[in-house]
């Protein structure tokens, strides 16, 4: 994914979510907190699977409410199965889904369920310590 490639040199958290997904909404503050506590070393990129027509009515207001000012994308039209397979063939498309990438762009972790602050911290710690 080009967004991850653009964040090389930093630990990248790529999170797939939707406003209609309760577990996604519940984990979002922890994602934002972790990224904001690690400026310059962690990049959070979110990809909403909401309908693109919902961007103004639902997605942007939610991101604003969460205080998220980072890179936020919305999946466009197209074959959802092809999209899912390109992200990760092991991913069923269930939400939320979070993928952790090392500073060199290599994926190190896949969480195909909710993630919380402590788990993010534990997964990213080895990657953050290598860069220091």
Image (cartoon, rainbow, N blue to C red):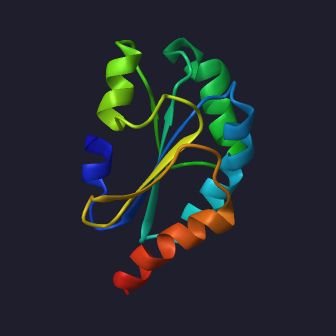
Q: Answer left or right for 73 relative to 60.
A: left
Q: Return the x and y of residue 70 as percentages of the image width and height.
A: 49, 49
- The image quarter containing residue 88 is top left
Q: Is residue 35 visible?
A: yes
**Residue 30 versus residue 1 in the image, above or below:** below
Residue 37 in view of the camera: no
Q: Residue furthest bottom?
A: 132
The number of discs equals: 0
- Rendering coords of residue 110 (x, y %): 46, 51
The one of 128 and 38 positioned closer to us in this rendering: 128
Asked whether, in this view, residue 62 is left or right of residue 45, the answer is right
Name which quarter of the figure residue 91 lies in: top left
Q: Residue at x 51, y 47 (%)?
A: 98
Rendered-image quadrant of the N terminus: top left
The residue shown at (50%, 76%) is 125
The residue under the point 35% across, 66% down is: 10
The residue at 54%/12% (across/down) is 53
Residue 72 image position (x, y, % from top left):
48, 39
**Quadrant of the image occupied by residue 24:** top right
For the C terminus, the image quarter is bottom left
Q: Nearer the viewer, residue 9 or 69?
A: 9
Query: Left or right: where does residue 62 sit relative to residue 76?
Result: right
82 relative to 115, above or below: above
Of 86 and 63, which appears nearest the observer? Answer: 86
Q: Position of residue 55 (x, y in %)?
A: 56, 22
């Amino acid at each position: 994914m080009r967004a991850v490639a653009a964040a090389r040199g930093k630990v990248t958290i790529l999170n797939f979510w939707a406003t209609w997904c309760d577990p996604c909404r519940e984990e979002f503050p922890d994602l934002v907190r972790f990224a904001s506590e690690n400026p310059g070393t962690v990049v959070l990129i979110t990809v909403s699977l909401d309908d693109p027509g919902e961007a103004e009515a639902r997605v942007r207001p939610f991101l604003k409410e969460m205080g998220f000012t980072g890179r936020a994308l919305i999946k466009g039209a197209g074959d959802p199965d092809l999209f899912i397979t390109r992200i990760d063939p092991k991913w069923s498309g269930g939400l939320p889904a979070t993928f952790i990438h090392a500073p060199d762009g290599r994926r190190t972790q896949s969480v195909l369920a909710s993630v919380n602050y402590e788990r993010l911290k534990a997964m990213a710690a080895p990657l953050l310590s290598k860069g220091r």
